[in-house]
Image (tube, helix red, strand yellow):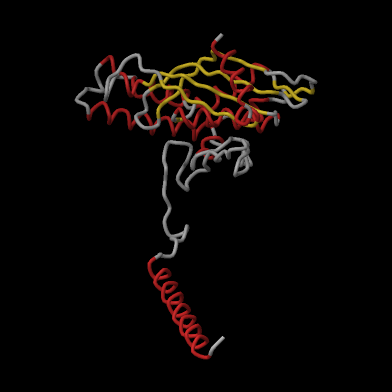
Amino acid sequence: MSSSTEALADSLSEKLKAHSIHDAQDLTEAVPAPPSPLRHHVVHEGYGFRPPSGVSTPIVTASGSSTDVLIPDAHGLGWPAKDTYERLSATPEERKAREQKIAAAMRTILQSIGEDPDREGLLRTPDRYAQAIMWMTRGYEERLADVINDAVFAEDHDEMVLVRDVDISSLCEHHLVPFTGKVAIAYIPNKHVLGISKLARIAETFSRRLQVQERLTKQIAVAVQEAIKPRGVAVVMEATHLCMTMRGVQKPGAITVTSCMLGCFRDQQKTREEFLTLMKS
């Protein structure tokens, strides 16, 4: 290679090197550093997530496993809210005081909407409402271990177990009005089965809390998964929401359907199709 050719090659090499360094610096300046996760906390209230005051329903990965401990609460309540422990451990006197606070708030509501809380028909309404709302949210006082009550049995059964048409009633946490419907719960055992009535009891426990249908569906599925570690769990819920039928858009007859598939129900199409067929048969 001649000296002139070598000089030209060296010159091109230096220019390319300088150009690459310049582009790299521009790229570094153009792409901002990712924000620190501690700097911004995004709250997705109502769809399986809770703000820092409570523990969120774990996110389920594509393989059906959870990215968090399934039932992370040491008291066995399953995703308690901030004041759930206080209610759970309340003495009779503290429970009475809690009901009195609710009744006083309801009396204020009656006055605020233009009613007379002292007229005969409403005289005891605040007390009745306080007792009713405590009953309708009694799921905050139920431990999952007590609900299941050791009804886990060793059984060499590897076919689908399905309980369908289980009635559920809950309160929408956005408007505190009911949504009602039916839920189908299925699982494929892995050497253990769960007492059939316990599937309905698990659904009842989580429905007796302030809920959204999406989160309720997932909590039922994850609780069954944690209880007996089956090969898979499937839950489908159909419900009518009064917040949609008697207010707002006012569309009576509209039905909301949600589902949660874990394990083999998520991974295997034939298993999922069998569940959907049996659910509707």
- Residue 226, image x and y in percent? 66, 33
Quadrant of residue 72 within the rendered picture: top right
168 is higher (above) or lower (below) than 209: above
Asked if residue 158 lies left or right of residue 23, the reply is right
**Residue appearing at x 62%, y 31% in the figure:** 267
**Residue appearing at x 42%, y 46% in the figure:** 43
- Residue 54, image x and y in percent? 50, 43
Viewer-side residue, 114 vs 191: 191
**Residue appearing at x 22%, y 27% in the figure:** 113
- Residue 261, image x and y in percent? 58, 29
User: Residue most toward the bottom?
Assistant: 3
**Residue appearing at x 55%, y 38% in the figure:** 79
- Residue 251, image x and y in percent? 30, 18
Quadrant of residue 147 within the rendered picture: top right
| Placement of the N terminus among the 4 image quadrants | bottom right
User: Residue most toward the front?
Assistant: 2
| Placement of the C terminus among the 4 image quadrants | top right
Asked if residue 201 lies left or right of residue 249, the reply is right
Viewer-side residue, 261 vs 57: 261
